[in-house]
Image (tube, helix red, strand yellow):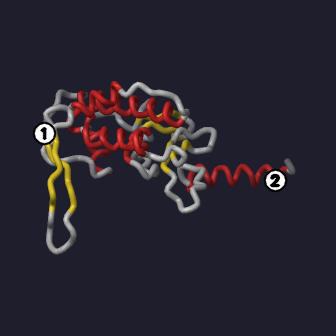
């Protein structure tokens, strides 16, 4: 699975699900968008999860840790969605690495906000905020609203935050439109 030049999809409405979606089907091929430490760092920055002071790690260490976290979370989401018991040991190993604390940031006259700061001596520490978001989703998320795209060729997940809670597709522009076109062709053929 090699990554094309486009970026991973950010459509899930939850960072932990967007992390799972860094493996997707593109042009009929399963693609892993994380091919290097730089890819993971760019994704963390895009998701606003990269903190200043990211440490220097051995080449490939961040990629390996991120892929391990992603697959652990994917397995736990599948188990939770299926109403089965999952083994949280791998995710808990990431959570144990968190060497961070909240800090109140108050800039100007706007309301203050909390920001998590801490060490990044290991890839697991850098990924700790994402691990915490995944654990929170698994523990507190409404899994009636966590869904896999209904298109049969799609592997993407999302959190349905629509008012009616009837979202079916990862994206109307992609899978939803493909479904509509296929249904229109069926009607045209008289099926």
Task: Classify 10 Å Cα crowding around label 2: few (below 14), some (14-19), many (20 and above).
Answer: few
Place of residue 45 in the rendered image (x, y in percent of width and height, measured from the top left): 27, 49
Callout 1–callout 2 Cβ contact below 8 Å: no
Q: Which residue position is annotated with label 2?
A: 187
Place of residue 152 in the rendered image (x, y in percent of width and height, measured from the top left): 63, 39
Q: Quadrant of residue 147?
A: top right
Task: Classify 10 Å Cα crowding around label 1: few (below 14), some (14-19), many (20 and above).
Answer: some
Place of residue 67 in the rendered image (x, y in percent of width and height, measured from the top left): 35, 30
Residue 84 visible, this orientation: yes
Q: Nearer the viewer, mark 1 or mark 2?
A: 1
Residue in the image at 34% along x and 32% along y: 69
Place of residue 43 in the rendered image (x, y in percent of width and height, measured from the top left): 32, 45
Residue 113 or residue 155, whichever sits in front: 113
Residue 118 or residue 135, whichever sits in front: 135
Up the image or down, 169 lies above or below 124; here it is below
- Asked if residue 167 lies left or right of residue 103, the reply is right
Q: What mark, if any, has residue 119 been given in the picture?
A: 1
- Asked if residue 125 lies left or right of residue 31, the reply is left
Residue in the image at 51% along x and 42% along y: 156
Residue in the image at 41% along x and 46% along y: 6
Which secondary structure lies at badge 2? helix
Q: Quadrant of residue 61?
A: top left
Mark 1 or 2, nearer chain start? 1
Which secondary structure lies at badge 1? loop
Q: Find the residue positioned furthest to the bottom.
A: 109
Residue 39 visible, this orientation: no
Q: Quadrant of residue 70?
A: top left
């Amino acid at each position: 699975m090699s990554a094309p030049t486009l970026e991973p999809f950010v459509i899930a409405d939850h960072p932990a699900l967007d992390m799972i979606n860094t493996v997707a089907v593109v042009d009929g091929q399963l693609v892993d968008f994380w091919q290097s430490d730089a890819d993971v760092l760019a994704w963390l920055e895009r998701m606003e999860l990269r903190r200043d002071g990211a440490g220097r790690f051995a080449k490939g260490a961040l990629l390996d840790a991120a892929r391990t976290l992603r697959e652990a979370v994917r397995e736990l989401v599948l188990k939770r969605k299926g109403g089965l018991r999952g083994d949280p040991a791998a995710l808990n190993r990431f959570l144990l690495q968190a060497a961070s604390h909240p800090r109140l940031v108050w800039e100007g006259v706007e309301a203050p906000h909390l920001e998590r700061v801490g060490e990044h001596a290991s890839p697991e520490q850098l990924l700790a905020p994402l691990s915490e978001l995944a654990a929170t989703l698994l523990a507190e998320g409404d899994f009636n609203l966590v869904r896999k795209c209904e298109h049969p060729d799609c592997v993407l997940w999302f959190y349905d935050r629509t008012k009616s809670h009837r979202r079916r597709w990862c994206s109307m522009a992609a899978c939803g439109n493909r479904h509509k076109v296929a249904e229109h062709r069926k009607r045209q053929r008289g099926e």
